[in-house]
Image (cartoon, rainbow, N blue to C red):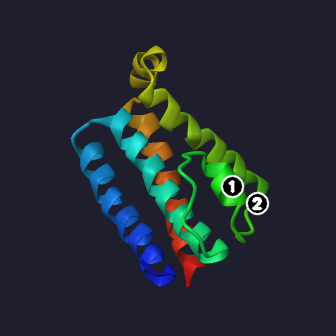
Amino acid sequence: MDIKQNIAYWVESAAHDLEVAETLFKNQKYDWCLFVGHLVLEKILKAFYVRDRKEAPPWIHNLVRLAENTKLSLTEGQLLFLADINDFNIESRYPDYKFTFYKTCTKEFTEKQFSKMKEMYQWLLSQMK
């Protein structure tokens, strides 16, 4: 797979996962909506990694580390937001955190966080052009 194909793969995969996250939200699976929302941002950042470094992205899930290894100019606020979203990956994966995270993911909490994730995703897409 060449660089353009690799970038397209990550961008298309992120768009697919955003649709999945929307479906999860509509079906009140709020914890999984935020987990998949993390994947959306991870995948779009991996597209930037490929674009900027001309190599396959590392097998990591840390959004801040991915972003720092691109040429994106992120604000401190954006980096802090990505750091917060990292928790959705960890807390929904590991049993010790899973139940607490599940209880945290009310409709209101998820709606607010998911909305911010979609804004970040749209901004990232705008930077890809």
Residue 9 drawn at (x, y percent): 39, 71
Q: Which residue position is annotated with label 1?
A: 78
Residue sitting at the far right: 76
Question: Is 103 placed left or right of 121 in the picture?
Answer: left
**Residue 62, picture quadrant:** top right
Q: Where 43 falls versus 91 (above or below)?
A: below
> What's under tag 1, amino acid-wise?
Gln
Instruction: Tell me what residue is drawn at x 56 percent, y 42 percent.
Output: 85
Secondary structure under tag 2 reads: loop
Residue 12 drawn at (x, y percent): 36, 70
Q: Residues within 10 Å of mark 1 (few under 14, many from 20)?
A: few
Q: Where 12 falls versus 40 (above or below)?
A: below
Secondary structure under tag 1 reads: helix
Name the image quarter holding the C terminus. bottom right
Question: Is 44 placed left or right of 31 in the picture?
Answer: right
Of the pair 55 and 95, the residue shown nearer to us: 55
Q: Where 2 falls versus 108 (above or below)?
A: below
> What's under tag 2, amino acid-wise?
Thr
Residue 97 drawn at (x, y percent): 48, 19
The disc placed on residue 20 is none
Q: Which residue position is annotated with label 2?
A: 75
Q: Where 1 falls versus 61 (above or below)?
A: below
Instruction: Tell me what residue is drawn at x 66 percent, y 59 percent.
Output: 67
Instruction: Tell me what residue is drawn at x 29 percent, y 59 percent.
Output: 19
Q: Are marks 1 and 2 in contact (CB under 8 Å)?
A: yes
Disc 1 from disc 2: Cα separation:
5 Å
Instruction: Tell me what residue is drawn at x 51 percent, y 31 percent.
Output: 90
Of the pair 57 and 35, the residue shown nearer to us: 57
Name the image quarter holding the N terminus. bottom left
